Image: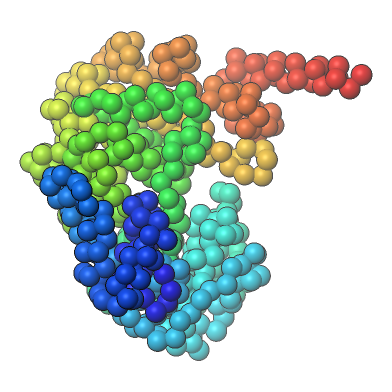
Amino acid sequence: MTPDVPLTIQWFVYALTGNEILSDEDAQNLWESLNRTGDLADFAGNVLESLCMGLPVEEQEAWAGQMQALVDYACQQAESGVAPDGSATGEGEGGDAAEVQFAAVEGYGDLPGLSDVMSLSDEEVRERMITLLTSLRALGCSDLHISAGSPAFVRRLLQIERIDSYVLTPEDAQRLNFSLLSDEQIANFKEEQDVSLALEVGYDRFRVCLMEQKDGVAGSYRLVPDQIKTLEELGFLPKDAANIRRLLDYHNGLILVTGPIGCGKTTTLASMINTINEKRQDHIISVEDPIEILQMSYNCQVSQREVGRHTNSYRSALKASLREDPDIIVIGEMHDLETIENAITASETGHLVIGTLHTGNAANTLNRLLDVFPPAQQPQIRAMTAGSMRGVICQKLVPDGFGGLTLVYELMLNTMAVANIISEGKTFRLQSTMATASKQGMCTFDQCMYEKYAMNLMTREAVLAEMKDQTVIAQVNSLWAQREAQAARANK
């Protein structure tokens, strides 16, 4: 779509092509059939007519519902004044009539400086922030930090790197961090002194967290993946991805995705939801803070709710969801007693519940899940969890030895042995049970790394730096010795 096309239609086509409903060529042909005139309603009606031709009435109604969701999305994104290609237009709030196209960058030196922020107009500051944010993916960064009293810095391959030597003043940091917010969001931040929201700039989405600190305003911008990847694309080995998909066939129970902050839980959760969306016909209610990865309704009806915008809290949304006829409930973060209690109860009453926790391994996950309850209630909760738990996926990102990062994980499935461990509260036995249950589909972190080393996805030095199990370390060294011997024989 060319820049002269209305911004709402540009975003509508972006959503259509991104969800593989139409190709770029088909969208262009439909626009041409309207003689390149008309508004979003005309164009959406044209698209709907082409999709519904010859379909039964119930399928036409389903398409009509999805088109309305895409129209609402396009209108919301167009309000920003930024086109899907990252250019700013005059159609949104505070936009400039001139189109601004940002060039690709190859290194931090190509980024604009921040020392002159106070001399720029509001629109120029906004463009400066858009340039910084849209450059993150090309530079291989996961986060941008704009903080008073510090130079701007990014996180790349888990390491902090400065992109500028200029130390931002409180006024600089406030102008930069406020430049992409609405007046309502700024007022909310000033009242609460911190705010968490999702922001869309061009093709990229960001999870934005602003806070007040001793030197002024600090903002962190987490780059959200631009597409939903399969479990294999995220780094799960094929056999383990198949085991996870089998977990998603259950119609009730509890599945947990755990790990430290920044380990990819959100992308794993999105991939799992997308898998369900493709192979089941159910109602999914997802509660997130904020909504990061947008899920369209394919075979499933997906309802995404954002804490603070569509609901007051996780626990109130979870309690309400039980009256909204869901089949699957997704909880972005389980961090308090009432949320965890409602999640366990929902998993027992005919719902598949998928949630996340910030824990380091499967044993700690179960301890965290159970220890929030009063001692007198724990035997009952252990019995409920032993019966409803389906599995735990605990993951983290580690260096692969080739200059990048790779996903390593442990997978716990609720077998009879695991259920007994949960009900008896003997979680210290869980690690050894998982280590000896590979034929049942389980694996530990060290076993996962060994398999990645065997498949040449990690180097020996990288896996040895992370491993703790002496048995698996011996297996790595044995495999390395075999490879060295084979290489020596080949060189003779």
Which quadrant of the figure has residue 322? top left
Residue 73 at x, y percent in the picture: 27, 62
Residue 165 at x, y percent in the picture: 63, 71
For this view, does 65 lie left or right of residue 449? Answer: left
In the image, residue 119 above or below residue 345: below
For this view, does 341 lie left or right of residue 438? Answer: left
Quarter of the picture containing the N terminus is: bottom left
Residue 107 at x, y percent in the picture: 65, 64
In the image, residue 112 above or below residue 232: below
Residue 280 at x, y percent in the picture: 25, 33
For this view, does 72 lie left or right of residue 471? Answer: left
Which is more toward the observer, 15 or 241? 15
In the image, residue 308 above or below residue 243: below
In the image, residue 76 above or below residue 437: below
Which quadrant of the figure has residue 301? top left
Residue located at (59% from left, 23% from top): 450
Residue located at (25% from left, 25% from top): 250
Residue farthest toward the left in the current orientation of the protein = 323
Numbered circles on residues, count: 0
Residue located at (45% from left, 12% from top): 439
